[in-house]
Amino acid sequence: MTMETRGLGATGPRVSALGLGMMGMSDLYGPADRDEAIATVHSALDAGITLLDTGDFYGMGDNEMLLREAVRQRDRGNAVISVKFGALRGPDGRFAGYDARPEAVRNFLAYSLRRLGTDHIDVYRPARLDPAVPIEDTVGAIAEMVEAGYVRHIGLSEVGAQTLRRAAAVHPICDLQFEYSLLSRGIEEEILPTARELGIGVTAYGVLSRGLLSGHWDSGRDLRPDDFRARSPRFQGENLQRNLDLVEALRATAQAKGITPAQAAIAWVAARGEDVVPLVGARRRDRLAEALGALEAGLTPEEAAELENAVPRGAAAGERYPEPQMRHLPA
Ligand SMILES: NC(=O)c1ccc[n+]([C@@H]2O[C@H](COP(=O)([O-])OP(=O)(O)OC[C@H]3O[C@@H](n4cnc5c(N)ncnc54)[C@H](OP(=O)(O)O)[C@@H]3O)[C@@H](O)[C@H]2O)c1
């Protein structure tokens, strides 16, 4: 199969139509096998996936070192490395706010370049808006790093329409990373139209709603306390059952087309537009192979509508983040 490519906004690089999100290989989703994770990155690159997404706070730098190890055995030039920065954490892993001051931008970037073993990052973005710092200052500081050659493109993550406009007035923004799935459609009302108006692409994360929509999830799954899903409202009690009922409806619709629920969920996001690139959080080769199958599904508008009938907009039970983290989100 030849990998389809999409432009990351009007000013960004062309990337594979599916990106690999590496977070779960180091953090937040329970134990992961490092060798299998590296084999999964290799398998992704071999399949033509170019977009690799990480964050300096995923495993407190571990995820970047894993990426370095995986890419060292391949051609760095074939990888578009996207890095989020700014999330603060304690030694116990707890999240403790955000720091996107210009001096923090330069500091975080210096550490990331060293951990990644590269002289440039392809897309660099604050993980969230730092409420204490005007976005113009953060983007201005990254723009200086673009000028100096350490960063190629600037992205954003989970910001609202007004912030997009203010940021784009300082420097071209190639993409906005945002949770977007059949269960999370908050971006559609105002943010996506604004991104489109400004020529900003979308890298969609959580397209499987962190595994919930994959068809592999069941209510008996044991979660360690440090697993994000142990606190995520959508994975709790009655909410979980209601969401899994939606997945069964998705499964039935997907089966009629001969695809799995995960493939249907990924294909639905990919069908939102040429300017939307889904990231999948595969950390094993079998999961990656399933995700890649979604690119061949080629949904017609009618099929996409059938999936939306199975999982109607707004049907998700529970917010997409625990309450304290919701305060940092625009939608
Ligand atoms: N900007 C932001 O704020 C933000 C936030 C979160 C994530 N992200 C980025 O987006 C990436 C993807 O997000 P995510 O990992 O939360 O979302 P996801 O792709 O919705 O979920 C990944 C989970 O789905 C499960 N899964 C089951 N079948 C799968 C399949 N065929 N392919 C892939 N995964 C399958 C995985 O399973 P197993 O448990 O079996 O491995 C894993 O637990 C992250 O890795 C990260 O780079 C960005």
Image (spheres, helix red, strand yellow):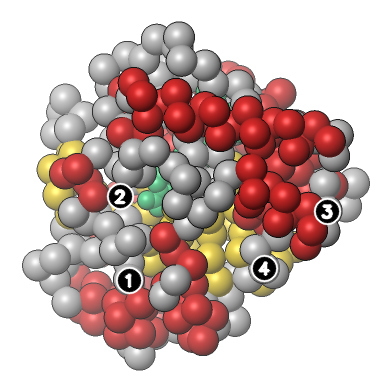
Task: Kindly report the distance in space between the C-alpha atoms of the residues bearing marks 4 and 1.
Answer: 20 Å
Using the image, tell me which numbered label, if any, was put on residue 111: 2
The answer to which quarter of the image holds residue 58 is top left
Confirm or deny contact between disc 2 and disc 3 (CB under 8 A): no
Using the image, tell me which numbered label, if any, was put on residue 273: 4
Q: Position of residue 129 (x, y in %)?
A: 24, 64
Q: Position of residue 59 (x, y in %)?
A: 33, 32
Residue at (53, 59) in percent of width and height: 203
Identity, as a three-letter code, of the amino acid under mark 2: Tyr
Which residue position holds label 1? 160
Mark 2 crowdedness (10 Å alpha carbons): few <14, some 14-19, many ≥20: few
Sequence-wise, the earlier of marks 4 and 3 is: 4
Residue at (44, 23) in percent of width and height: 241
Mark 1 crowdedness (10 Å alpha carbons): few <14, some 14-19, many ≥20: many
Mark 4 crowdedness (10 Å alpha carbons): few <14, some 14-19, many ≥20: few
- Residue lying furthest right in this view? 1
